[in-house]
Amino acid sequence: MPATVDAVELAKALIRCPSVTPASGQVFDVLEQALTPLGFSVHRWVMGDPPDGPTENMVAIRGNGGPHFGFAGHLDVVPPGDNWSNDPFAAEVVDGLLVGRGANDMKSAIAAFVAAVSRVDTVDGTLSLLITGDEEGYATYGTPRIIDWLIEKQIRPDMILIGEPTSVDRLGDTVKIGRRGSVNMWIEAPGVQGHVAYPHRATNPIPPLARVIAALDAVHLDDGTDQFPPSNLEFTAISTPTDASNVIPGSATAQLNIRFNNLQRGAALVAMVEEIAGREAPGSTVRARISGEAFLTPPGPLYDVVVAAIEEETGQKPELSTSGGTSDGRFLIQLCPVVDFGLPNATMHKVGECAAVDDIHSLSRIYERIVRKVLA
């Protein structure tokens, strides 16, 4: 058996590879170099062109037969932003915290899982890692293409754990058993540009767009379910082509996002917005991008092993939640039951993103317990 992997050291090595989404190349080299000595067969491929690519994906597999336990994650990160007190890709440990872009979301979790399986020398079944370089972007060439590859190869995991940072106040307090769907829309109301002093020679698109906004703001989507909060529609931007104070613009655009539970479907929500926009602002157009549908993993063996492993390591029973944003579980649910569990998420995407060194090691021990319960 090769030497075991240190989760924090591997996390440092991954963070030191700048991998702003969509990611490929060096950061995948580092992960492959960690997995190959552990007996994994590593498959990598790059797809797509800018702006959604090029994206690299990796499937690493060890063992054969069932059960098949998959771990999913992403090596891409959001841009670091400004005003860091140190290099965001230096991966320094400061006062017990590993600091760097991706330390929290989610290179440390990937490193923790690799360290976990390095301590499990035999498995009765199959282990796999499903790793993409495009989770923080639009996922055009990311996890959906991994699913295509698995289906082509007739490989289907029995359960998948995604290492997203789900904990809230302390490690192990929250497991995500489902996620809300998300759809972004852009409503453009047409007008005729002109001088504000001669409104009869122009058509102002802003009042009809305002009526669309008011009508949509008054919509009550639902009251939620036992597992999901109510769906919510939020406007995120309003714009016109001109900033001049004496020009009636030729068009006006409103941007919105709907986070929705499993009472809704993305296409039906788009149709609703199109109907209201057409009624309140005739001639308007709606452009939509559905990021994913809501999903819920029903109670079963995956719940049981994850909750038991967390309780054994931390002494606490986690809350089973569907709150927060989306994850690649929205795609992977078509294969098998999926849950998300990882580090406390207070610093994800923030300047100064970090993860406690002790939490990374504890997370690795939880992951090890899960693997042993399923396969060892």
Image: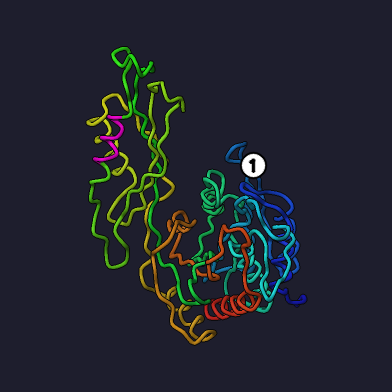
Is residue 373 on the magenta stretch? no
What span is in magenta?
207-215
* Amino acid type at mark 1: Pro
Which part of the image, by quadrant, shows the C terminus?
bottom right
The residue lying toward the viewer, choosing from 275 and 214, is 214
- Position of residue 145 relative to residue 105, above or below, is above
Query: For the residue carrying disc 1, how many other residues have a C-alpha within 10 Å: few (<14), some (14-19), or many (20+)?
Result: some
Q: Is residue 197 above or below residue 223?
A: above
Residue 373 picture location, percent across and down: 53, 80
Q: Which residue does the image show at 40% across and 50% down from the upper left?
A: 182
Q: How is the image coloured?
A: rainbow
Residue 115 at x, y percent in the picture: 67, 73
| Prevalent SS, magenta region | helix
- Image coordinates of residue 305 in percent, x first then y, are 47, 78
Q: Which residue is mark 1?
A: 54
Describe the element under mark 1 as helix, strand or loop.
loop
Q: Quadrant of residue 184?
A: top left
Q: Is 21 on the left or on the right of 320, as rendered?
A: right
Which residue is located at x 46 percent, y 59 percent? Answer: 329
Residue 169 is situated, as x and y percent measured from the top left of the image, at 49, 74
Residue at image point 69% right, 75% down: 95
Residue in the picture at 29% in, 24% down: 283
